[in-house]
Amino acid sequence: MSEDQIVKTPQQSAVETRHIVMPDHTNHYGTLFGGTLMSWIDLIAVMVAQRHCGREAVTASVDKLNFMEPISIGEQVILKASVNYAGKSSMEIGVQVSKENPYTGVVTRATTAYLTFVALDENKKPCPIPKLKPETETEIRRYENAILRQEANRNLLQKIKGNGKV
């Protein structure tokens, strides 16, 4: 069976990890530096992409990154990521970032991100990936929303190219 005939669920490649915010991770406000968090987001997303396609995958774009809450020194950062959508050779990975107060246990959503990864073959060329079969209501909603984001990005690119001012 070729990779484009294999079907996987989002849960099969999902990854969750944690970090504790240390002083060297912070900016001059004492909160987690955005660049550090972006690095952690990219790392968890590539792990998900590799698990889904079973091969090398590279970041093609960061489609959306929303910083909603600052994360302070000593707080724990929980990153959860899964495949939202899989095309022919690319996939959208959604990453949800929460912060947890280690003393109270209160968890707050802090950041969301959507990244696109492309699977590469042995010659570093895009190659077919397994199809995605969302099963839960949440997975189906994420899949449908990913299609909407993909269409919106395509329409925006056409409008920009139409202006001749890329």
Image (spheres, grey):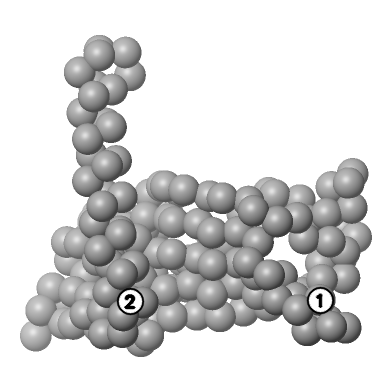
* Residue at the image point whose x is 62% and y is 79% from the top: 17
**Residue 72: x percent and y percent?**
84, 61
Corner quadrant of residue 25: bottom right
Corner quadrant of residue 41: bottom right
Indicate the quadrant containing the N terminus: top left, top right, bottom left or bottom right. bottom left
Mark 2 closeness class: few <14, some 14–19, many ≥20 residues within 10 Å: some
Q: Nearer the viewer, residue 99 or 7?
A: 99
In the picture, the disc for residue 157 is none
**Left or right: where 32 falls relative to 117:** right
Indicate the quadrant containing the C terminus: top left, top right, bottom left or bottom right. top left
Whether residue 121 is visible here, answered yes or no, is no
Q: Which residue is mark 2?
A: 139
> At numbered mark 2, what does the secondary structure look like: helix, strand or loop?
helix
> At numbered mark 1, what does the secondary structure look like: helix, strand or loop?
loop
**Residue 47: x percent and y percent?**
47, 73
Q: Which residue is mark 1?
A: 101
**Residue 10: x percent and y percent?**
34, 80
* Residue at the image point whose x is 31% and y is 80% from the top: 137
Q: Determine the CA span between mark 2 and mark 1.
A: 28 Å
**Left or right: where 106 falls relative to 114:** right
Q: Earlier in the sequence, mark 2 or mark 1?
A: 1
Query: Disc 1 residue type?
Result: Asn
| Position of 106 relative to 74 (above/below) | below
**Residue 126: x percent and y percent?**
23, 56
Query: Disc 2 residue type?
Result: Glu
Whether residue 93 is visible here, answered yes or no, is yes
Mark 1 closeness class: few <14, some 14–19, many ≥20 residues within 10 Å: some
Q: Nearer the viewer, residue 109 or 159?
A: 109
* Residue at the image point whose x is 23% and y is 24% from the top: 159
